[in-house]
Image: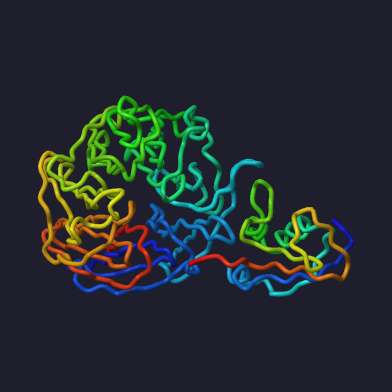
Amino acid sequence: MAKRVLLLVGTRKGAFVLESDESRLQWSINGPYCEAWPINHVIAGEDGALYAAGGNAWFGPAVWKSTDLGESWTRSADGLAYSEGEAPVTSAWSLSSAHGRLYAGVEPAGLFESTDGGKSFTHVSGLRDHPSKPDWMPGAGGLILHNIVRHPDDANQTWIAISAAGVFYTADGGKSWEARNKGTRCDYYPGDMRYPETGQCVHCIVMAPGRPERLYQQNHCGMYRCDDGGKSWRSVEKGLPSSFGFPVAVHPHDADTLYYIPLNSDSGGRYVPDGKAAVWRSRDAGETWQDLRTGLPQENAYFGVLRQAMATDKEANAGIYFGTNTGSLFASNDAGDSWREIAAHLPVIHSVESVTLDG
Amino acid sequence: MAECKVHTVLPDALVRLFPEAPRRLDLAASTVDELFEALDSHFPGMAECLRDNRPSIRKHINVFVRGERAVLSTPLETGETVYILTAISGG
């Protein structure tokens, strides 16, 4: 039976769903969904539903749900709120569906969980009980919990990332959390203070397939890898044109192959270096790098790629995808060797995820 | 719940989220906060769209009573009209 490959795209003005067959050459575009609300992340849940995290300046945060691949949507904000007196939740930023629980990360940073398929949420309060909480500082995108990484076999283990507070890890289902930032820099602190326990501006973390102890990280200040669940990170940025960028993606079947999109610098415009787009691939876990440019614009390209806007699919010859803050969506159906622009003129792209359906 | 009946006008962007809600309806409430509770009893989830956990009217929602911007505790009187409006926001 023919496969259907879907791309789930969150944008500043709604969610979009793109669809192709397993050749991944021709794509249809459907949307905008979710009343054109700003949508920060769209995922396929383990229950087969689509979930979209967002927030609207008028009505606050919401998690939207579709059980018909985007044709119709419902929304809920039930429980997506802190205690009386605390700063209100403005938006839902990140989603993760695993082990029977839907997690939602929000701004200002915190974690909520749903055990009823997104109808209602409860606050995972242990995270905001961490002693570093008073020192958490917002980045340009706000004080956001933007990445949730679940252990594939242990429901109690989760890593989350907050800008700018760092990576935190729980082994008890969210009751208690510990910082996991050793080895990651804060270049915006004085010299001898550049390696604090928390305060790092982590931009993105992903887990290597089949190796839950291995995480890759794009930080405001460097690219990193760990092989111990985040206890110690080491730089893998040597050979890259910049240590600054937002997303990182890992090959779906090869734990040593990963992809970064370096931008020129945090203070130089935050676009691809010299206006020439490239995805950088490592096949040895970050030891060496190769720039991938075939099919990508090599002049007058002044876009950036946001932290949740790069993804891979699960096909044997992996598809790699990224969306730009100028509304273009680029795709590779050969693990990054060549690229095609499959959509243009979309709103600012916040996130890209993929899901493959049989038939 | 209060005896007062007030005319309530809802913004279009809110009604789109609650398709069963009319743009105009009469509800019993003696304060804006009670009005939000009354709306929520008819359309579950509507109050959290209008009121945050501080608790306050959401920052970009304007509620007008007797020609003035209201707060949650603003009293309401029978027969008057409460306008709930979306502020100029977006981009």
**Percent position (x, y) of residue A299?**
16, 66
Q: Name the quadrant of the C terminus of chain A.
A: bottom left
| Residue drawn where x is 32% and y is 45% of the image | A204
Q: Is residue A36 above or below residue A49?
A: below
Q: Residue at x 25, y 70 (%)?
A: A20
Q: Nearer the viewer, residue A185 or A252?
A: A185
Q: Is residue A232 above or below residue A116?
A: above
Q: Of all residues shown, which one is farthest toward the top?
A: A192
Instruction: Please give left or right for residue A135 compared with residue B77 in the image.
Output: left
Q: Quadrant of residue A276?
A: bottom left
Q: Does A89 sit above or below residue A330?
A: above
Q: Quadrant of the N terminus of chain A?
A: bottom left
Q: Residue at x 75, y 60 (%)?
A: B70
Residue A269: name its quadrant.
bottom left
> Residue at point 54% right, 52% down?
A90
Q: Nearer the viewer, residue B31 or A214?
A: B31
- Can you give x and y, in whole percent of width and height, for residue A263 in the image? 24, 52
Q: At which x and y percent is residue B43?
A: 68, 63
